[in-house]
Image: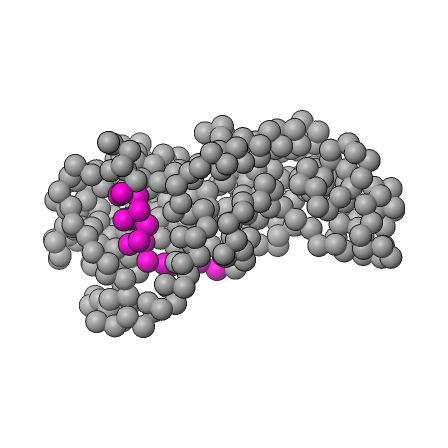
Amino acid sequence: MIYFSRIASCIVLLFILSSDFASGKTLTEKAVYAERKSLYLKTSALTGVPWSVIAGCDQYARNIASFKRSGKTDIPLISLNFSKKAWTGLLNPDENDDDPKTIAFFGGAGKDGNGDGKASLENPEDRLFAFAERIAEFGPGEQNYRIAIWDIYRRGKAVDLIEDYARLFEAFNSTDLYSHAFPLPLRSNYDYKSTWGERRGWGGLRIHEGTDLFANYGTPVRATAYGIVEMIGWNKYGGWRLGIRDIQGNYHYFAHLNGYAPHIRKGSITKPGQEIGYVGSSGYGPKGTQGKFPPHLHYGIYRDNGRTEFSFDPYPVLRVWEKQEKAAKH
Ligand SMILES: [Zn+2]
């Protein structure tokens, strides 16, 4: 067995665990979610841009910022940000300018959102308002929002992710969508251990990117997060597999299924704990192949860091979710 990617994955995992990914919810976090939602709603009323679109953009910024603030424990209220130059205007001689009139004269993005007469880059409400105004310039409607977001980020993946986040915020009418569930019912018969980085035999030299949870055929498989089904169908390695994108940009990958739960298709919205499929032994061959290995759920997580997607070992978070669910039952 080869473990050469283990060190790198441990480093990545350390700050994911230290950020909001696996932590339990506290009162302060709840307060932050509520405050965020009221700011989104207020900005939406001022600009006409739906709150879910504003929230989606802020969520995208938050996810990417989480890669840069490892070690810090404070959760910023609003993550959307501007450079000083973008805020005050390229040719503005005063890069700390907070006068909306001179900023407008120099073509800066800075605006006064909270009505105190100042366009302050430090003020989350001003930043949120200025950002929503940039989107509003492109006109109303989903298509225009997509164009606006493309213009801002110049990344097709950003447009798709933000659209997903906006859909989730709208569907649940909440900004508190961070809870998780263990992928198998706790009462079922299952067994798993860390298998990250093990070499595997089929389909050439590939490293095992995930955790295998052994269980009986037909054991229900549950969504691990609030998310959207991004991919579903046959793959020669994963068999009947399914991928869910959550609000933090994590892609939850479930493979070797026996089949899917009714009504689950591409674009379906999931809740943690919702049944999405059943344990099987499909894969490692052409469509329909099964029984080449004992039945198990292969579960993996991939994360978007703003440029690319990378996988990390899901084993430690599986342990956390399992423990949290056990504790909640008592
Ligand atoms: Zn596996």
Q: Residue at x 16, y 50 (%)?
A: 191
- Eyeballing the image, is 127 above or below 5? above
**Residue 261 location in percent, x, y?**
25, 35
Q: Which residues are magenta?
A: 308-323
**Residue 131 location in percent, x, y?**
68, 42
Please identify the quadrant where the C terminus is shown: top left
Residue 248 appearing in the image: yes
Q: Residue at x 77, y 37 (%)?
A: 112
Residue 282 appearing in the image: no
Q: Residue at x 27, y 62 (%)?
A: 196
Q: How is the image coloured?
A: one colour
Q: Nearer the viewer, residue 308 or 129?
A: 129
In the image: residue 286, left or right of residue 77: left
Q: Quadrant of residue 182?
A: top left
**Residue 109 location in percent, x, y?**
76, 46
**Residue 317 magenta-drawn?**
yes
In the image: residue 110, left or right of residue 162: right
Q: Nearer the viewer, residue 113 or 309?
A: 113
Q: Residue at x 24, y 58 (%)?
A: 194
In the image: residue 32, left or right of residue 137: left
**Residue 326 location in percent, x, y?**
24, 38
How many numbered dots are placed on residues in this image? 0
- Eyeballing the image, is 250 above or below 267? below
